[in-house]
Each structure stands twice: as structure tokens, then as C-alpha cells.
Image (tube, coloured by chain):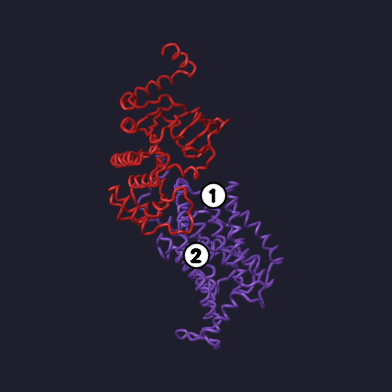
């Protein structure tokens, strides 16, 4: 049960990653690899500030801000310096590896006795549920610590998800969506596509860094390696989410990304429990995304009755 | 008022692909004037429109619009003054967003966009009325994605969007060329209505001689990046499709000679 709750909690935290990836990959159609660096940046900034005695809210907000800055740099490299989008992300991600090491001054910062969002959630949980160590939920014995953590994260993600949904219905938010949909159109409406892309990538990486900051506090450490493979992880969550909701409406896709992240984490937890070698995890994730990308095309080709001649340009 | 002063533009200069698209175009367009631009393929008529819209900067020359020197304004800055309908019906709207959202984006053309709701009840009512005026039955489908509409419907909506906040200049770039005849007719009628009603200063590029003679109060013919003839007032009103076609035939024949020979002949015989 603890394992299940843990998977749910991490899935919800990484939903922030999924939302960020949804914003860059799906709304902007921009393959933003910065995420691998910015999730670690968020964790590194938050953990370092916590160790230095700053409050958890300040530390988490600083992590978010760091991600915004990283994403904005990628956006500026792409729009103002005209560097290929993928390469812009790779450059910033690579630079962030060193920056993260500088922020932490070592490769791993443990959070042992610091007051974090996690310890605060536990404290609130203990006060709400009384002094007991275990709760009975539908016949399951659940640790108060795990349950309050899950509730706190669930609340956070719900609030952020709703906020993001509402944001996408504002004047600025619709301009962001239109920029991804048809840049020529939104330019003709007087919007600077460059500015919107910088802003959007900032927001995307801010969300991802926020995920990193919360994850570090949940697992009790920040590690310079924790970002590796995270883009594909987020993409997998988004793809599962799209399959789950099967719609193009923004609200449902946001919900889908969160659900996809949780479901994917659960699947991984189950697979590990059944004896999947943890070393194979990233390989399996990559294969999964590959299958999700190629599968529909393959299916279409197989179900097509007659081979279509595509070499004729006319 | 639009003033173009000696616009020149060369694409890929110094390469084998060099194209001298605009070779000194000057033009003054009075407020409320409706100018039709026709020309041979590659004559620079679309390039001229794009130069005014700010798709690229001209190499030399100046562009003044409504008292502003917009020569160095970026495309999105010029959009504050300019409404635009593209040739491709898919270019002017965001396909995955609803009709209402697209219209709401156009209702703030060139204005700052903050955290206010994009759609409120008042705006919805207003845009429902405007969409109803199209007589396409779209007012009941405001929340449908624009991508699900036909090219003609999308072009009509783009026209509505471009003219929502009365622009200082309306640019129509062969905006019916990609439509079936019936839709093209509908969009042309709508364009005419809107331009008349709001007295919009308009530049319209077209391939259709019918449209060229029936619409507008002034007509220019372009060839090789220059304005060849400029018909206004009574001359424009008299012009028939055959006259324009004859003019094109003359140009075509003259092009058979090298430019220097043509010039010589013209000086000797015309």
C-alpha cells in the first residue's frame, strides 16, 4: 500500500513535468529538451535554499523562477539568435548541468532535518487526523504520513491544473495557444511570436522546475543526475493522457496529462515490482514513446486496403 | 493614407537565384480608396503586399501609413494598423481553436493582451451578431473548432476578423484564388460590402479580370517589379476584361525582345 501511495504521489508531482512538456511539445510543437536541466535546476535551487535555512515556500518559488529563466534562455536562443529549437534546448540543458553543480556545490544535496513542504504536509496531516500513525481507508491500512503527503500534492496539482486551464482562457493564454496553432495568424493579430515563445517556454520550464523542487522535498534530496530521461518520461505521460481523454479540448488535455503521469508512474511501479530491472527503465520508456509515435502510422498503413502510390507529386 | 516611396527588394542578392522582385515602386493611396493590383506571374504584386504587411523589410524606400513611418516596423507591430486576408484560407485562422476564440483574438488586434478573460458574455453576443451577418449559419457553431469549417467559411471569418477593428489598411492577397467559384463569389461580395460600409482603404491583389474590373476605384498593373499602368476614376470605370488582357498580351510580346531592343522600339514607334 505504501508503494501504491508513493507511486501515486510521485506520479502527481511529475504531472508538473507532464504539463510543462504538454505546453512545449504539444501547444508550441517545440521539442524542448531544456526540461532535463530545468527539473534538476528547480530541485537544486530549492534544496540549496532549504539547507541555508530559507522557508520551503520561498525555496520552491525560487526553484520555479530558476526554471522560468532557463526556459526563457532557450526561447531567446531560438528566436533572437535563430538557433534550431532542438539545439537551443540541448545547449541550455548542457550548460545547466554545470550550473546545477555550482548551485549545489556538490552532486547531491540531502534534506535531512530541514523544514520542507513535505514535513509541513506531514505536520498538517498529523494535526488533522489526530495522533494515530495509521488510517483505515476502505479497509486498507494507510500511514498518515503517506496519506497527508498524497493529499497535499493532490491539492497542489489540482490548484495548478485549474489555474493553468483558466490562464489558457485569458487574452494572453489564448494568444499562446494560437501561436502554437498558427504563428502567421497570430502575427497578423499583432502578437510578437518571438515574445510569446520565450514566455511560453519560460512557463513550461517553470512548471517543470517546480516539479523538480517538490520532488526533491518529497524524496529528501536533490541530485544532479535526476533530470536524465525526464523529457521522454513527460512525453510518455502526455501521450497516455491524450489516449485517455481522446479529445483536443484544453481542459481535458490538462486533466489527461495529470492522469497520464499518474498512470505511467503506477505502471512503472508495478513493472518494477514484477521484477523489471531498474536499469531497463529508460529503455522501456523510450520504446513506449517510440511505439506510441509509430503505432498509429503503422496501423493506418496496415488497414489501408490498397497501397497508395505516394511518389507522384501531382 | 498609404504612401510607398521607391520601394526596392531583391531576394537572394548575389546568387544565381537572385530575384529583383520590386524595382522602385511608388504609390500614394488616398484614405478610403480601394486599389486593385493585377500583374503577370512573378510581377511582384504579392511581394508588394508582403512588403507593406512587413513580412520582410524592403532594401530601400519608405512606407508611410496613417501618419507613421512603418518602414522598420516588425510585422506584428504593423498589424496594429493593418488587417490582412491571405491567399491560403488556412493561414488566417487558428484551426484547433473555436470560432469564438479566433474572433476574440481578432477583437484585440494590435492591443496589449493581459489576464482578462478572452471571451465574456458581451463579446460573445457581439461576435454572434457579426457571424450571423455572414449568413452562413455559423452563429450556432461558435464553439466548434475552425479547422472543421470549409475554406470559404474560413476565409469569410478571416475577412470578418481582419476588419473587426476598422484597420487603417486592409490587405487582400488573392484571397479567393483557392476557393471554389461559389465560395469565391460569396467572399468577394462580403469583401465589397465590408469595404463599402466601413470605407476601408484597401489593397487587393487578384488574378481574376472579372474582379479587377468590377471592384475597386483604382487599378494598377505590375510587371517585373514595376507599376506599368495606373487607372483611376473614369478610366478605371471604363476598363473591360478584354482591355486588360490585351495589355498583358502587349507585355508578353514586348518580353520576347531583350529589354534594350524593346526600349529602342518603344522610343521609335510609340
Q: Quadrant of the C terminus of chain B?
A: top left
Q: Which mark is residue A237?
A: 2
Question: Along the polypeptide, which appears first: circle 1 or circle 2?
Answer: 1
Q: Can residue A301 be seen by looking at this rendering?
A: no
| Chain rendered red | B
Chain of the residue under label 2: A
Tell me whether marks 1 and 2 sit on the same chain.
yes
Tell which residue pokes out farthest to the right in this image: A105
Which residue bears the numbered disc 1? A194
Quadrant of the drawing holding the N terminus of chain B: top left
Q: Nearer the viewer, residue A9 or B129?
A: B129
Residue at the (33%, 45%) spot, across then down: B152
Q: Position of residue A33 (x, y in %)?
A: 57, 57
As rendered, which of A190 and A105 lies closer to the eye?
A190
Q: Is residue A230 above or below residue A50?
A: above
- Dot 1 and dot 2 residues touching (CB under 8 Å): no
The single residue placed furthest to the front in the displayed view is B67
In this view of the protein, which residue sits in the foreground, A219 or B162? B162
Tell me the shade of chain A.
purple
Q: Percent position (x, y) of residue A254?
A: 46, 64
Specify whether A245 is left or right of A3. Answer: left
Amino acid at each position: 500500500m505504501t508503494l501504491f501511495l508513493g507511486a501515486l504521489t510521485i506520479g502527481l508531482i511529475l504531472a508538473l513535468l507532464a504539463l510543462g512538456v504538454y505546453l512545449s511539445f504539444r501547444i508550441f510543437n517545440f521539442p524542448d529538451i531544456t526540461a532535463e536541466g530545468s527539473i534538476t535546476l528547480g530541485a537544486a535551487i530549492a534544496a540549496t535554499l532549504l539547507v541555508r535555512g530559507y522557508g520551503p515556500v520561498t525555496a520552491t518559488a525560487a526553484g520555479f523562477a530558476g526554471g522560468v529563466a532557463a526556459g526563457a534562455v532557450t526561447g531567446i536562443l531560438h528566436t533572437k539568435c535563430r538557433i534550431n529549437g532542438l539545439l537551443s534546448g540541448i545547449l541550455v540543458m548542457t550548460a545547466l548541468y554545470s550550473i546545477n553543480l555550482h548551485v549545489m556545490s556538490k552532486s547531491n544535496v540531502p534534506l535531512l532535518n530541514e523544514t520542507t513542504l513535505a514535513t509541513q504536509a506531514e505536520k498538517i496531516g498529523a494535526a488533522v487526523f489526530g495522533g494515530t500513525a495509521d488510517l483505515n481507508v476502505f479497509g486498507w491500512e494507510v500511514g498518515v504520513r503517506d496519506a497527508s503527503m498524497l493529499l497535499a500534492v493532490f491539492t497542489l496539482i489540482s490548484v495548478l491544473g485549474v489555474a493553468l486551464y483558466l490562464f489558457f482562457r485569458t487574452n494572453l493564454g489564448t494568444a499562446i495557444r494560437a501561436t502554437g496553432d498558427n504563428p502567421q495568424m497570430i502575427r497578423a493579430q499583432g502578437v510578437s511570436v518571438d515574445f510569446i515563445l520565450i514566455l511560453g517556454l519560460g512557463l513550461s520550464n517553470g512548471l517543470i522546475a517546480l516539479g523538480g523542487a517538490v520532488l526533491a522535498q518529497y524524496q529528501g534530496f536533490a541530485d544532479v543526475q535526476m533530470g536524465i530521461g525526464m523529457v521522454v518520461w513527460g512525453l510518455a505521460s502526455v501521450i497516455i493522457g491524450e489516449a485517455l481523454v481522446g479529445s483536443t479540448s484544453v481542459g481535458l488535455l490538462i486533466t489527461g496529462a495529470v492522469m497520464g503521469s499518474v498512470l505511467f508512474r503506477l505502471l512503472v511501479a508495478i513493472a518494477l515490482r514484477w521484477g523489471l530491472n531498474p536499469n531497463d527503465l529508460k529503455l522501456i520508456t523510450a520504446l513506449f514513446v517510440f511505439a506510441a509515435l509509430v503505432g498509429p502510422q503503422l496501423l493506418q498503413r496496415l488497414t489501408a486496403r490498397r497501397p497508395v502510390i505516394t511518389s507522384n507529386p501531382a | 493614407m498609404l504612401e510607398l516611396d521607391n520601394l526596392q527588394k531583391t531576394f537572394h542578392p548575389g546568387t544565381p537565384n537572385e530575384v529583383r522582385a520590386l524595382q522602385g515602386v511608388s504609390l500614394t493611396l488616398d484614405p478610403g480608396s480601394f486599389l486593385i493590383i493585377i500583374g503577370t506571374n512573378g510581377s511582384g504584386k504579392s511581394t508588394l503586399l508582403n512588403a507593406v504587411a512587413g513580412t520582410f523589410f524592403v532594401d530601400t524606400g519608405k512606407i508611410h501609413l496613417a501618419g507613421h513611418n512603418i518602414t522598420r516596423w516588425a510585422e506584428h507591430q504593423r498589424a496594429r494598423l493593418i488587417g490582412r486576408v491571405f491567399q491560403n484560407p488556412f493561414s488566417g485562422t487558428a484551426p484547433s481553436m473555436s470560432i469564438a476564440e479566433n474572433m476574440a483574438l481578432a477583437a484585440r488586434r494590435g492591443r496589449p493582451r493581459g489576464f482578462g478573460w478572452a471571451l465574456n458574455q458581451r463579446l460573445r453576443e457581439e461576435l454572434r451578431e457579426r457571424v450571423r451577418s455572414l449568413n452562413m449559419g455559423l452563429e450556432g457553431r461558435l464553439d466548434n473548432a475552425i479547422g472543421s469549417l470549409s475554406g470559404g467559411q474560413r476565409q469569410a471569418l478571416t475577412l470578418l476578423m481582419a476588419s473587426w477593428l476598422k484597420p487603417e489598411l486592409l490587405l487582400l492577397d488573392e484571397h479567393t484564388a483557392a476557393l471554389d467559384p461559389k465560395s469565391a463569389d460569396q467572399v468577394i461580395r462580403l469583401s465589397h460590402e465590408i469595404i463599402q460600409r466601413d470605407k476601408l482603404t484597401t489593397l487587393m491583389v487578384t488574378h481574376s479580370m472579372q474582379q479587377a474590373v468590377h471592384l475597386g476605384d483604382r487599378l494598377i498593373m505590375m510587371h517585373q517589379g514595376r507599376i506599368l499602368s495606373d487607372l483611376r476614376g473614369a478610366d478605371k470605370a471604363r476598363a473591360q476584361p478584354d482591355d486588360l488582357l490585351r495589355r498583358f498580351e502587349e507585355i508578353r510580346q514586348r518580353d520576347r525582345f531583350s529589354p534594350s531592343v524593346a526600349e529602342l522600339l518603344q522610343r521609335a514607334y510609340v
